[in-house]
Amino acid sequence: MRQTILVVDDEPDIVEIIQYNLEKSGFDVIVAADGSAALEKARDEAPDLIVLDLMLPGLEGTDVCRILKQDERTRFIPILMLTAKSEEIDRIIGLELGADDYVVKPFSPREIALRIRNILRRRTEPETAGPVRAGSLVIDVEGHHVSVSGSSVSLTATEFKLLAVLFQRRGRVQTREELLDVVWGYDYMGYGRTVDAHIKRLREKLGEAAGMVETVRGVGYRFAR
């Protein structure tokens, strides 16, 4: 079955390029030109992934991301943000709100297709381990479920993969570059802030178990033994 991508951008030329290359790569594509239309189509069409430009007329991309991640109907849909180089603060906000990844304009259409495949692969790749416990934290890798003190914790696919990788390598320091390679699946050319933003968001969601994810200053992160 072909997977469906919702592309949200108000620039017709960019939409045309993305749509052409994604359809050529085997995806079905639906389009929205503003934030309100994006929310409506995300709820009605349930796409497999959303490509979301941050600079939109009316409702901004960061607001769209926040609303999608708060809505039970759409919060599990992965989001790939499109940003300009000057929008670093918006990228960080978007990642903290739960976006999975971002691409900086100008971009290669092939890069977008690659990142989409990587995000979708993280959602669907088979897992073999059963539930494991670390204090009040329980990670069910096979069931893709996390709980703290018996309460379910809602994580994005990327947040879950990040937590699982840190746990599997508990006690060992993982550099940002190593995490980018293992979790995101390719070299981010030094975009270490991506890891930092996801770690911050992950800790917020883990609540009382946040201390299990430790910062090793100047190096990276590790899961406490």
Image (cartoon, rainbow, N blue to C red):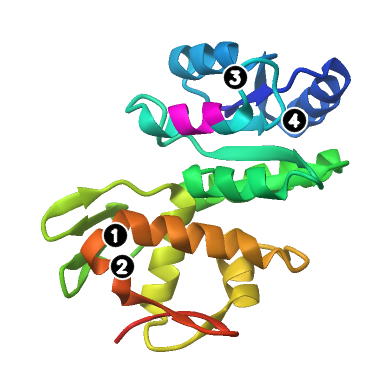
Quadrant in the rendering for residue 189 = bottom right
In the picture, the quarter occupied by the N terminus is top right
Quadrant in the rendering for residue 28 = top right
Q: Magenta segment range?
A: 63-67
Question: Which kind of residue does numbered mark 4 sit on?
Answer: Leu
> Which of the labelled discs sits on residue 22, or is there none?
4
Q: Can see residue 124?
A: no
- What percent of the width, then of the height, locates residue 151? 15, 51
Q: What is the CA distance from the residue labelled 1 to the residue labelled 3?
A: 30 Å
Residue labelled with disc 3: 59
Of the residues under marks 3 and 2, which one precedes in the sequence? 3
Q: What is the CA distance from the residue labelled 3 to the residue labelled 4?
A: 25 Å
User: Horizontal placement of 6 versus 204: left or right?
Assistant: right
Residue labelled with disc 2: 210
- What percent of the width, then of the height, locates residue 116? 65, 42
Q: Is residue 155 shown in magenta?
A: no
